[in-house]
């Protein structure tokens, strides 16, 4: 898998650690597509992963940005914080995801791509 990829199968924390070292040192930026159930990761910016998914057939309203911290414990593994999450037209005016249902779905999907 190239550093920036759309994945459909889970990856190991070791893979994510190596990817993090190539980019930010301790974090991997990722964008999940709630409708298609895929995730793009390994880009320098969330917007780049978002663009990859849009070109692959995703719809913007289904895409949400997260940061994956592979060295952290499970409760700190995934952080919802991305500029692409700011979308007033979906009632989300924050880099966080303010809708609890969407936030839970994003976290669950993102976690499903990380092997223990």
Image: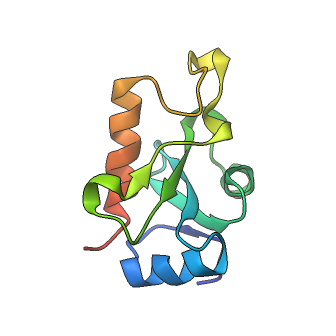
| Residue 64 drawn above or below residue 8 | above
**At which x and y percent is residue 55?**
74, 54
Q: Is residue 21 left or right of residue 11?
A: right
Can residue 12 be seen?
Answer: no
**At which x and y percent is residue 28?**
55, 65
Residue at horizontal 56%, vertical 74%?
A: 20
**At which x and y percent is residue 56?**
68, 57
Can residue 21 be seen?
Answer: yes
Q: Is residue 73 left or right of residue 99?
A: left
Q: In this view, does 78 lie to the left or right of 60?
A: left
**At which x and y percent is residue 71?**
39, 72
Quarter holding the C terminus is bottom left
Q: How is the image coloured?
A: rainbow
Residue at horizontal 56%, vertical 57%?
A: 30
Q: In which quarter of the image is residue 43?
A: bottom right
| Residue 68 drawn above or below residue 37 | below
Q: Quadrant of residue 106?
A: top left
Between 6 and 74, the one lying in front of the other is 74
Q: How many marks?
A: 0
Between 110 and 67, the one lying in front of the other is 67
| Residue 88 drawn above or below residue 70 | above
Quarter holding the N terminus is bottom right
Q: Quadrant of residue 72?
A: bottom left
Residue at horizontal 37%, vertical 72%?
A: 10
Residue at horizontal 47%, vertical 79%?
A: 17
């Amino acid at each position: 898998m190239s550093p920036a990829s759309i994945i459909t199968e889970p990856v190991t924390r070791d893979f994510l650690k190596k990817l993090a070292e190539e980019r930010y040192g301790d974090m991997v930026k990722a964008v999940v597509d709630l409708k298609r159930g895929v995730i793009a990761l390994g880009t320098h910016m969330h917007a780049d992963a978002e663009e990859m998914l849009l070109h692959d057939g995703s719809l913007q309203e289904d895409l949400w940005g997260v940061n994956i911290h592979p060295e952290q414990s499970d409760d700190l593994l995934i952080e919802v914080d991305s500029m692409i999450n700011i979308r007033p037209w979906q009632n989300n005016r924050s880099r966080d995801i303010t809708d609890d249902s969407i936030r839970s779905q994003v976290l669950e999907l993102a976690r499903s791509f990380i092997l223990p």
